[in-house]
Image (tube, rainbow, N blue to C red):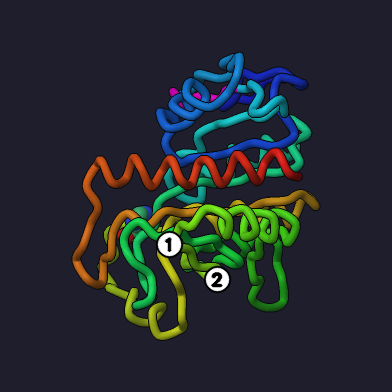
Amino acid sequence: MPTPHNNARKGDIAQTVIMPGDPLRARFIAENYLENPVCYNEVRGMYGYTGTYKGKRISVQGSGMGMPSMGIYSWELFNEYGVNNIIRTGTAGAVADSVNLRDIIIAMSASTNSAYASQYNLPGTYAPTASWELLSTAVKTTENTGVNFHVGNIFSSDTFYDDADSLSKWHKMGVLGIEMETAALYMNAARTGKNALCILTVSDCPLRNLSTTAEERQSGFRDMMEIALETAIKI
Ligand code: HPA
């Protein structure tokens, strides 16, 4: 059955979904990497496509920005459409000194200032974590590309424009980068017993006031997409 946010019917979506934040990037991936892509959703412009990559059925869909949006779409994919694996492909700001523009970050875990975990009424602090199978497969895949990459903890923030300027405190804790969706994705995967991973390209360095050009973002995006697709067909 379609949901209020997704027109797809059961069976329209593959077991593995690649999720960029931007729905236009989802369309770009479908049109440039998938064979025979079929669009299954246009509700709110949140494009979703299913096709094949090197013969394996794969879907690609936007998540939107922020944890509420990622929370809705990934919950529906896992619970309503039988999806087993979600690989987020996004951009991040560098936080750790060792992380540079255009590097790739593979998020082993996602710290957060979001209240998303409060719905579970846990008697402590939950640690949102990637699926080991997806993580180890993506790391092996990335090692073969020659791309500069880092694996570790990221920070999923509820704010892009942050009045409290808290980034230096996360920097102190060894966080690699900042983005806005992964903690919710990892919690939804944990709650439903499914698998999730986040792969990021570094588009800016907020602590060092640096950012990439549109052209650099496009080529970094291609490296990340190829890593995500190659990971998707190995699992
Ligand atoms: N903050 C939050 N999300 C981001 C950033 C950032 O600096 N860069 C890319 N995504």
In the displayed structure, 206 sits above or below 75; it is: below
At x 56%, y 20%, the residue is: 41
105 shown above or below 21:
below
Quadrant containing the C terminus in the rendered view: top right
Q: Looking at the picture, does residue 147 appear above or below residue 230?
A: below
Instruction: Mark 2 or mark 1: name the one nearer the start of the chain.
Output: 2
The reply to whether discs 2 and 1 touch (Cβ–Cβ < 8 Å) is no
Question: Which secondary structure lies at badge 1?
Answer: loop
Give the farthest residue toward the bottom.
172
Residue drawn at x 40%, y 28% as measured from the top left: 24
Q: Please state the quadrant of the image where ligand 1 appears.
A: bottom left
Which x, y percent locates residue 228? Answer: 58, 44
User: How much space separates mark 2 and mark 1, taking CA atoms?
Assistant: 16 Å
Residue 207 belongs to magenta span:
no
Tell me residue 199's x, y (percent): 53, 53
Numbered badge on residue 171: none
Q: Looking at the image, how many numbered discs can be counted on the residues?
A: 2
Please identify the quarter of the rendering in which residue 203 is found: bottom left
Residue 159 visible (yes or no):
no
Q: Answer yes or no: disc 1 within 8 Å of ligand 1.
A: yes
Image quarter (top left, top right, bottom left or bottom right) of the N terminus: top right
Q: Nearer the viewer, residue 206 or 42?
A: 206
Amino acid type at circle 2 is Gly
Q: Amino acid at mark 1?
A: Ser
**Position of residue 19 in the picture relative to residue 192 (left or right):** left
Mark 1 Cα within 10 Å, few/some/many (few <14, many 20+)? Answer: many
For disc 1, the marked residue is: 157
What SS does tag 2 mark?
strand
